[in-house]
Amino acid sequence: MSRTARIRAIIATHRAQGHDAVPLAIALRNRMGSRATPAEIDEAVAFCREILDAVPVLIDRLREAAGRQGLAGLIEPMLAHAESYFVDPVDRLPETLLGELGLLDDAYLALHAIRMVQVEPDPLIRIDLGPPMTFLEQVLGESTLARLKAEMAASERLLLREAARWKAAADEQRRREAARRPAEAPLRPAPRPTPGRRMCTACSGLGSATCGACAGYGYHTSRSTRVDWRDNAEYVTERTPCSCSGGQVICRACGGSGYV
């Protein structure tokens, strides 16, 4: 069973117990004040449950998006860290005693970790975590949030450490590839002047031209729209490699020789 499947099972287990909504409703009534109507409290309870259900969905979507972009090694430790809040039985608010109310601190820490791996201006998934996190801050209260700061600081240190390790590994990989490159045969020999032949003006003697299909980028960009966990439109950008060679194609005018 995957970690997100275990999270869903934990949430379902506590939700199946009918009395679990009672401490959650009481806590919300205390936060919202005596003027809160039963309908407003029921709506707040539903929002809490919606947030809990969204956590494993967001983790799965981030893991899928990171895999497509080759960033799985960078964010996987942070996602595992977010998942551990639900799986680890040691909590600031023990769910064994408080039911779903005891899962809200886990959800807040998990959302905090998820938001940290969302790097602007090109995040892995388009979603605004501000509203659910602000709502949870109001429900948990200042005293609980103060106790959670140590965990949040540990998450930040973990992300920075893993980012530095991932960058060092990527730099080493690039260095090794650059060291192997001179030993490899070039794709095409450099054009040599030939008596009686003119330099190709289409490619300026290079023998290659910019790929018209990808405009020289070496990849194609496709955009699509998805609906997030709150029925909001989400714009997704995906890149697929072009069939050219790094944004270059053989010049049609000279056949790659550089001269005509």
Image (spheres, rainbow, N blue to C red):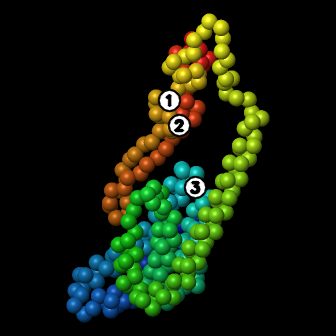
| Disc nearest the viewer among 3 and 1 | 1
Could one spot residue 170 in this view of the protein? yes
Q: What percent of the width, then of the height, locates residue 210?
A: 51, 29
Upstream in sequence: badge 3 or badge 1: 3
Secondary element at image label 2: loop
Considering only vertical position in the picture, is 242 above or below 104?
Answer: above
User: Disc count in the image?
Assistant: 3
Please name the residue that numbered disc 3 is placed on.
71
Callout 3: 10 Å neighbours few (<14), some, many (20+)? Answer: some
Could one spot residue 84 in this view of the protein? no
Upstream in sequence: badge 1 or badge 2: 1
Secondary element at image label 1: loop
> For the residue marked with disc 2, what is the amino acid?
Gly
Please name the residue that numbered disc 2 is placed on.
218
Residue 206 in which image quadrant: top right
Q: CA distance from mark 2 to mark 3?
A: 19 Å
Please name the residue that numbered disc 1 is placed on.
211
In front of the other: 139 or 154: 154
Q: CA distance from mark 3 to mark 1?
A: 27 Å
